């Protein structure tokens, strides 16, 4: 290939990309944050503390999540349930619950360790703050309402996509079958307030859903 032919070929690539950009066809970028790409089901976003369908808290204050956390960013204190007005099923409930999101590495070990599926990830990742104290999420922000509505540090945060906070349980649903093929398609998790019992994950033998050019599922 001569230098002129190589030059013309190179410029053809440039021209093709130029027109693809100005026409918007074939682009792999999206107009974030106006346009949110669909995230994988097992995305590790901001945590929530879940409730059962009857509104009781799933956390029993056992501190296993805090013990499993490699970043030492969870602080839990359990307390005895009031016999006449229990907060959770069983003897104890999570009286204090805090996660320091500045330390969290979003590894999901707290979710794995939790015996009651109380703590789960969501798909929300917009969590920037302007001071350190706002990065400490307390039980008030982490615990969902009795109807399953998640809470946020800043109710008026125009950059937070609250729908992504409603994607709780995704990680738990993915890991509940312990990776054993015999459990594929079987529900092995409890229902949650506001959403009920989530359907089983598609499983690894299923074909991936068709995607558009941006990688988002159709
Ligand atoms: S995701 Fe990992 S680092 Fe973050 S709180 Fe859970 S165990 Fe700790
Ligand atoms: S979130 Fe789960 S592991 Fe952590 S204290 Fe509550 S019940 Fe125990």
Image (cartoon, helix red, strand yellow):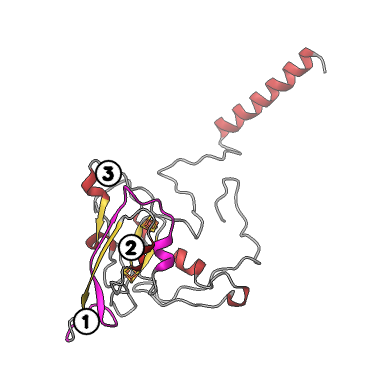
Nearer the camera: disc 1 or disc 2: 2
Q: To which residue does mark 1 refer?
A: 86
207 or 181: nearer the viewer: 181
Point out residue 168 in the picture as x, y percentages from the top left corner.
40, 64
Of the 4 image quadrants, the one containing the N terminus is top right
Q: Secondary structure at mark 2?
A: helix
191 or 137: nearer the viewer: 137
Q: Residue 167: in sight, yes or no?
A: no
Residue occupying image coordinates x 48% and y 69% = 173
**Marks 1,2: beta carbons within 8 A:** no
Answer whether residue 90 is magenta in the image. Answer: yes
Q: Secondary structure at mark 1?
A: loop
Q: Is mark 2 within 8 Å of ligand 2?
A: yes
* Residue 184, above or below 76: below
Q: Is residue 122 left or right of residue 180?
A: left
Q: To which residue does mark 2 refer?
A: 66
**Marks 2,3: beta carbons within 8 A:** no
Residue occupying image coordinates x 62% and y 73% = 181
Q: Residue 129 has which mark?
A: 3
Q: CA distance from mark 3 to mark 1?
A: 35 Å
Instruction: Report the residue that reaches farthest toward the right.
Output: 1
Tell which quarter ligand 2 is in.
bottom left
Magenta residue span: 84-113
Of the 4 image quadrants, the one containing the C terminus is bottom right
Question: Which image quadrant for residue 147?
Answer: bottom left
Nearer the camera: disc 2 or disc 3: 2
* Residue 82, above or below 211: below
> Which numbered disc flags the more N-terminal residue, 1 or 2?
2
Q: Is residue 116 left or right of residue 139?
A: right
Q: Is residue 139 left or right of residue 185?
A: left
Instruction: Report the residue that reaches farthest toward the bottom.
Output: 84
């Amino acid at each position: 290939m001569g230098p002129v032919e190589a030059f013309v070929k190179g410029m053809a690539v440039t021209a093709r990309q130029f027109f693809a950009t100005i026409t918007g066809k074939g682009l792999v970028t999206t107009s974030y944050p106006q346009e949110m790409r669909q995230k994988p089901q097992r995305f590790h976003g901001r945590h929530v503390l879940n409730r059962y369908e009857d509104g009781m808290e799933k956390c029993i204050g056992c501190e296993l999540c805090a013990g499993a956390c490699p970043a030492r960013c969870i602080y839990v204190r359990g307390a005895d349930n009031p016999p006449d007005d229990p907060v959770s099923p069983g003897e104890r409930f999570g009286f204090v619950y805090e996660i320091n999101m500045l330390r969290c590495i979003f590894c999901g070990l707290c979710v794995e360790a939790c015996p009651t599926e109380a703590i789960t990830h969501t798909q929300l990742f917009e969590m920037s703050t302007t001071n350190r104290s706002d990065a400490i999420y307390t039980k008030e922000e982490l615990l969902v309402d009795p109807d399953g509505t998640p809470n946020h540090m800043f109710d008026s945060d125009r950059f937070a996509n609250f729908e992504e906070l409603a994607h709780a349980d995704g990680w738990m649903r993915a890991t509940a079958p312990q990776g054993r093929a015999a459990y594929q398609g079987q529900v092995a998790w409890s229902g949650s307030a506001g959403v009920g019992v989530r359907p089983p994950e598609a499983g690894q033998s299923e074909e991936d859903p068709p995607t558009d050019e941006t990688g988002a599922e159709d």
